[in-house]
Image (spheres, helix red, strand yellow):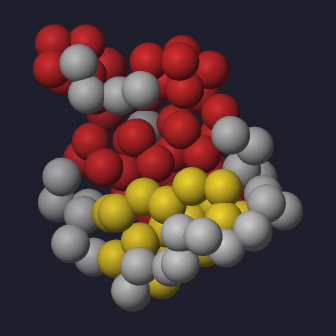
Amino acid sequence: MDGYYYLHTNGELIFKKFRPEDDSPFVKKIWSIDITRRETAWLLLIEALAMGARKDRIKELADKWGCDDKDAQTFVEYALVNGKPAFKLFKDGL
């Protein structure tokens, strides 16, 4: 695992090497990230977008991780077969 991202109440997606405090009033959600597992990157991007993360930050991370249209097709096929994402956030994020 590479670390954690959390969604701050102000819409910022912030990376931390160690898990942030869950009980902070400023933390909306925490995701563990392992960029060798593509689904962790996609789930973070889709769910964070659905929860109000800044779109420019989502794009920045998508570009950094190579989460493009072609890769999205692969992820959607994987997600629908394996039932991995929280489907409400998944649909909202897409």
Query: Residue visible at 31% across and 19% down?
Result: 76
Q: Looking at this rendering, what residue extends furthest in the right direction?
A: 10
Answer with left or right where residue 93 lies relative to residue 57. left
Instruction: Look at the image and tell me in which quarter the N terminus lies.
Output: bottom left
Depicted 86 relative to depicted 29: above or below: above
Depicted 53 relative to depicted 51: above or below: below
Answer with left or right where residue 92 lies relative to residue 65. right
Q: Tell me which corner region of the image, top left, top right, bottom left or bottom right, holds residue 7.
A: bottom right
- Percent coordinates x, y for residue 8 in the rendering: 72, 65
Front residue of 86 and 1: 86
Front residue of 20 and 17: 20
Query: Residue visible at 53% across and 18% down?
Result: 88
Query: Residue visible at 52% across and 36% down?
Result: 46
- Percent coordinates x, y for residue 18 in the rendering: 38, 86
Depicted 47 relative to depicted 63: above or below: above
Q: Looking at this rendering, what residue extends furthest in the front direction?
A: 23
Answer with left or right where residue 4 lies relative to residue 53. left
Q: Tell me which corner region of the image, top left, top right, bottom left or bottom right, holds residue 79.
A: top left
Query: Residue visible at 36% across and 51% down?
Result: 41
- Percent coordinates x, y for residue 75 in the rendering: 28, 28
Answer with left or right where residue 80 lies relative to residue 87. left
Instruction: Look at the image and tell me in which quarter the C terminus lies.
Output: top right
Does residue 66 appear anywhere in the picture?
Answer: no
- Percent coordinates x, y for residue 62 in the rendering: 49, 51
Q: Tell me which corner region of the image, top left, top right, bottom left or bottom right, holds residue 73.
A: top left
Front residue of 56 and 15: 15
Depicted 7 relative to depicted 83: above or below: below
